[in-house]
């Protein structure tokens, strides 16, 4: 109950902010940070709970973005429909990647997910309808009533998606699904021998992860008014999603949020104040430091002061 | 009465290596059954085929009158076949109690409150009650072996396969695990024991089968098995 009140307050705060006269740039940056909250939260469902490291975040994110573009060009579909279609496509791709876990584990699964990025990127490069390698300029539709700008509206949309993603991750973690996924992570053989339908749970985790990541990608073309493959399928999404979860802590739904807010904001600040290159370096150094010194992430470091165990 | 488990001409190959070559055996309800054989003779492969971790290539495995060779492991556990692992595979990021809550939730479909009560009762019977809230990663070797058995029990099995539950344990610890297995059997659970500690298998089993090179070379009462020239040859290579 407390959780839902907090989420309601956050949603209201996001809408309130978007209607306030806060500088436009804030929303431009906050949108990206919130995208990372969704990506990291989604990544953690498979990576943190089930222990399958997915490097393919850009593939899911990208398929979502392109699904939105197709719907926009083809049917002039509204944003909500674009997001729904993106989630569907991402879920399907997630299901497919989930089938890979039948034969691939550990590092081999991780490598296979990298291949999925290149497959998706190559497909989009060779598809003229969505702009091919040169990309596609997009015109934003008129902004909806209460919002002063399209970016403000997208900020609210992404905030609501982040809340939805966190609620889903939290449900999975606390339900019987979460315990099964943890059993899979600890020992797949033992999980299976103790009645856990490991394949079904892994497919479920992959599908939910894929759907959420793709949903997060759907508003991206409208945010940029542009889409092209190289930046859409950029490996920085891999690092952002996995890095946020590792830095925040993978054992609890709160971890990826903390990590994404921290890492995302830091990246935005450094990109503006120093440079885009230094920002990549900082993420790399942070990742190495956390993996070596605090493998449980920030949540692990501050465990003692947190109201929950684990 | 029909046997609880009936294995008929089960074979399994790994590449060119024949791990099981037409193994057949029957196990009656409530039996204490010993499975012995030298290293690499196919004992673990056989129980992996029975429990579903591996699929047999030919032959039938019938449990309670139902052919189970096509079923994934988790469904066989739900039907009543539970196992412990030769090398303990605890859920190491969970506490001992949480380890048992996996089968109580996924096999017996108990709510957590009921599952916890049942799990605590099992842990008490196993002498692990004081470790209930200890992370499984901090257990000693004996405790890990007991956890393997406790977790298997939490699935409320009709057939328990104990794969070298005593390997690496000292004399008194062997007796402790043996006592646990005897207790379980008295509650009506059929037990297949795979063991290298001869004295333990011989004390425990009503009937023993000896495997060598993937085939059964001898079957009978424990006393007869040790006298059998084939068994002696398999073990001593004479």
Image (cartoon, coloured by chain):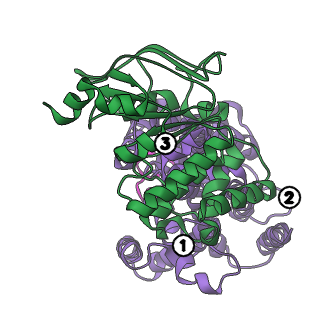
Chain colours: A purple, B green
Q: Residue at x 27, y 28 (%)?
A: B231
Residue placed farthest to the bottom in the image? A305
- Residue B64 in the image, given as x and y percentages of width and height: 65, 21
- Residue A177 in the image, given as x and y percentages of width and height: 67, 49
Q: What chain letter is assigned to the residue under label 1?
A: A
Q: Using the image, determine if residue A109 lies above or below residue A26.
A: above
Q: Which mark is residue A234?
A: none
Q: Which residue is mark 1?
A: A248
- Residue B1 in the image, given as x and y percentages of width and height: 66, 16
Secondary-structure class at tag 1: helix
Please tell me if label 3 and label 1 are on a single chain. Answer: no
Q: Quadrant of residue A90?
A: top right
Secondary-structure class at tag 3: helix
In the image: residue B44, left or right of residue B29: left
Please tell me whether mark 3 or mark 1 is closer to you in this view: 3
Say whether residue A170 is visible: no
Please tell me whether mark 2 or mark 3 is closer to you in this view: 3
Residue A231 among those drawn in magenta: yes
Q: Using the image, determine if residue B20 lies above or below residue B191.
A: above
Within-10-Å neighbours for mark 2: few <14, some 14–19, many 20+? few
Of the pair A304 and B35, the residue shown nearer to us? B35
Q: Which residue is mark 2?
A: A145
Of the pair B227 and A167, the residue shown nearer to us? B227
Q: Residue at x 27, y 35 (%)?
A: B38
Q: Using the image, determine if residue B81 lies above or below residue A234.
A: above
Q: Which mark is residue B204?
A: 3
The magenta span reads: A224-238
Q: Residue at x 50, y 51 (%)?
A: B178
Say whether residue B182 is visible: yes
- Residue B215 in the image, given as x and y percentages of width and height: 32, 20
Within-10-Å neighbours for mark 1: few <14, some 14–19, many 20+? many
């Amino acid at each position: 109950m407390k959780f839902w009140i907090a989420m309601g307050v956050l949603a209201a705060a996001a809408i309130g902010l978007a209607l306030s006269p806060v500088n436009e740039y804030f929303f431009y940056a906050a949108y990206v940070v919130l995208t990372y909250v969704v990506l990291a939260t989604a990544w953690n469902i498979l990576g943190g709970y089930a222990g399958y490291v997915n490097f393919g975040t850009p593939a899911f994110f990208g398929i979502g973005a392109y699904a939105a573009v197709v719907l926009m060009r083809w049917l002039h579909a509204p944003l909500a429909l674009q997001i729904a279609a993106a989630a569907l496509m991402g879920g399907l791709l997630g299901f497919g990647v989930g089938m890979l876990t039948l034969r691939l584990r550990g590092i081999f699964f991780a490598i296979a997910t990298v291949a999925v990025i290149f497959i998706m990127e190559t497909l989009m490069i060779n598809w003229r309808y969505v702009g091919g390698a040169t990309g596609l300029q997009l015109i934003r539709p008129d902004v909806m009533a209460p919002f002063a700008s399209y970016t403000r509206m997208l900020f609210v949309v992404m905030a609501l998606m982040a809340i939805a993603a966190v609620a889903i991750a939290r449900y999975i973690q606390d339900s019987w699904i979460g315990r099964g996924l943890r059993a899979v992570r600890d020992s797949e053989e033992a999980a299976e021998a103790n009645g856990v339908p490991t394949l079904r749970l892994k497919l479920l985790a992959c599908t939910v992860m894929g759907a959420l990541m793709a949903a997060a990608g759907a508003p991206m073309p409208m945010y940029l008014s542009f889409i092209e493959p190289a930046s859409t399928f950029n490996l920085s999404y891999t690092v952002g999603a996995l890095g946020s979860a590792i830095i925040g802590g993978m054992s609890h739904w709160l971890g990826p949020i903390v990590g994404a807010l921290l890492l995302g904001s830091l990246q935005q600040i450094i990109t503006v104040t120093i440079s885009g290159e230094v920002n990549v370096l900082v993420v790399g150094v942070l990742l190495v430091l956390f993996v070596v010194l605090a493998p449980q992430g920030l949540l692990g470091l501050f465990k003692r002061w947190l109201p929950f165990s684990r | 009465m029909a046997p609880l488990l009936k294995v008929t001409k089960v074979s399994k190959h790994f590449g060119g290596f024949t791990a099981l070559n037409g193994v057949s055996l029957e196990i009656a309800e409530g039996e204490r059954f010993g499975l012995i054989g030298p290293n690499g003779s196919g004992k673990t492969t056989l129980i992996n085929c029975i429990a579903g971790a591996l699929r047999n290539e030919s032959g039938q495995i019938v449990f309670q009158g139902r052919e189970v060779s096509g079923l994934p492991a988790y469904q066989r556990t739900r039907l009543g076949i539970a196992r412990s692992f030769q090398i303990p595979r605890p859920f190491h990021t969970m506490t001992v109690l949480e380890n048992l809550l996996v089968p109580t939730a996924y096999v017996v479909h108990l709510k957590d409150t009921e599952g916890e009560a049942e799990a605590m009762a099992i842990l008490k019977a196993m002498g692990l009650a004081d470790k209930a809230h200890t992370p499984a990663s901090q257990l000693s070797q004996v405790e890990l072996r007991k956890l393997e058995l406790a977790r298997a029990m939490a699935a409320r099995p009709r057939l328990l396969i104990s794969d070298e539950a005593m390997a690496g344990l000292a004399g008194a610890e062997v007796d402790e695990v043996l006592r646990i297995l005897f207790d379980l059997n008295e509650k009506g659970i059929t037990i297949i024991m795979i063991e290298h500690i001869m004295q333990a298998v011989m004390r425990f089993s009503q009937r023993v089968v000896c495997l060598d090179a993937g085939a059964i070379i001898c079957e009978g009462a424990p006393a007869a098995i040790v006298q059998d020239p084939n068994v002696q040859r398999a073990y001593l290579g004479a």
